[in-house]
Image (spheres, rainbow, N blue to C red):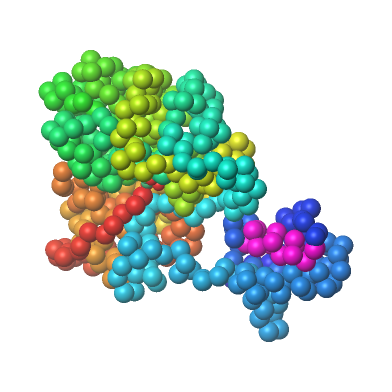
Amino acid sequence: MTLLLSAGRVATLVGDFDRSPAYAGLADALTLLIGDGRIAVETRLPSERELTGALGVSRTTVTRAYAALREAGYAEARRGSGTFTRVPGGRSRAHDRALLPRPGDGDAIDLNCAAPSAPPGIAHAYAEAAADLPAYLGGHGYFPAGLPSLQAAIAASYDERGLPTPPDQIMVTPGALTAASIVAQAFTGPGDRVLVETPTYPNATDALRHAGARLTPSPVDPEGWDLDAVAATVRQTSPRLAYLIPDFQNPTGHLMSDDQRAAYAEVLRRAHTVAVVDEAHQALALEGQPMPRPFAAYAPETITIGSASKSFWGGLRLGWIRAPRGQMERLTQARVSMDLGAPVLEQLVLARLLGDADEILTANRVRLRSQRDALIGAVEDLLPDWDFHRPSGGLALWCQLPGAFGTALATEAERRGVIIAPGPVFAAEGGLDRFVRIPWTRPADELTEAVRRVAAAWSVVRERPVSSGRTTRVMVA
Ligand SMILES: Cc1ncc(COP(=O)(O)O)c(C=O)c1O
């Protein structure tokens, strides 16, 4: 389908572009808009004549700007039909060999990774942040606690959520997963018990295992948390830490209510167990609903982990730790054996994004909500014998099959060009093969096609559930 863009709309989008010289400023503005998705790939740009009129510039300016776009790979001329947007390298530029290592993977619909593409506005924030960078070049560039302006912006986001936070209680990390590794190194040692939900985010449990922790699984049922079962497990095992994902839990999508948070916090307090709360999906409430208070508001000793990956973009590779007073030194000691700080430019970008986040976050939620609805609609239509709870936020549908066929289904689906993660990937200690996780992180038409292929795979597996021989894939999100 050809997307059309009027000259008036381009004039609004490029706004007051740099005119020294005008053709270069126009080309730069268009490149940014295409790069960060505000002008979609495969869009037909207005003719040179139309754009000349709408912008009030000379025809040569537009001609040279389009030529510069073509030269840089952000547009191509198609004989007789006009100039179309593209990005250099095409779709393959978005692939990583560790995540898609097999021949043919590049053409598959990748739903192994529950991480969306960047919402519009990220490239623009990079461009603005580049202008802030020179002020930092006179220093050494290492910020093991984080760039002060970013610590302050993150702390302010907790203030807004009703959890007063001084900036020096924030440590900026290269992503939430690194944050979890730092916390694991700092607060567990060989043999320490750590309560983990099951299913859960597997890379975090690996980080805890690598630090020597013994994991105590605590089920998150298809209906959510069973607080009586949690209390019994905590009483019997007295874990040192409890790693929890109360906000649109990965992979089940459950949201822990305020009452449950209060009750959970009380259970942990009695056993002197410290909560490590991963809020990676906190900003992804898709129904416009108010979010429960942060877990740390109920349990002040909580160590909270945050991420920019799902609200803004995974490529920023930024996350953070919010630690109670007195714990920063221990975290810093653990951190410097892993890395010495996150990149300055990305921190400047995130500080800008957080300073004016509403527009991007809202657009991101609108997009994710319509993708979620498309996915749910397709699963309901094509896989009527599956069960799932409809998440009010987050990124994925946790689907229950009428039998332990998850791994066999993932293998068969892969043969049909769609990659999904089977339940055992998320199990803290085996099992859960009745489930598969399907994220709504791709555009709606791709999700519908993916479900069509999964349904075809399911019709085979349901009749003939063979063992899969599937090898584990690297999973990031
Ligand atoms: C619960 C949870 N924690 C952490 C991460 C990793 O986040 P980051 O990209 O910030 O390392 C993910 C990614 O999906 C996640 O789901």
Q: Is residue 140 visible?
A: yes
Q: Quadrant of residue 336?
A: top left
Q: Is residue 105 above or below residue 274?
A: below
The residue at the point 46 percent across, 57 percent down is 442
The residue at the point 74 percent across, 69 percent down is 65
Q: Quadrant of residue 270?
A: top left
Residue 292 position within the rendered picture, expressed as x and y whole percent measured from the top left: 44, 26
Q: Quadrant of ligand 1?
A: top left
Residue 278 position within the rendered picture, expressed as x and y whole percent measured from the top left: 36, 35
Q: Which residues are magenta?
A: 21-34
Horizontal side of 322 relative to 37 (left or right) equals: left
Q: Quadrant of residue 197?
A: top left
> Most extreme residue toward the bottom, as rendered?
79
The residue at the point 37 percent across, 26 percent down is 328
Residue 355 position within the rendered picture, expressed as x and y whole percent measured from the top left: 60, 36
Q: Is residue 64 above or below residue 405?
A: below
What secondary structure is the stretch in magenta mostly built from?
A: helix
Q: Is residue 449 above or below residue 278?
A: below
Q: Quadrant of the N terminus?
A: bottom right
129 within the magenta span:
no
Horizontal side of 107 relative to 460 (left or right) equals: right
The residue at the point 57 percent across, 68 percent down is 87
29 within the magenta span:
yes
> Most extreme residue toward the top, as rendered?
270
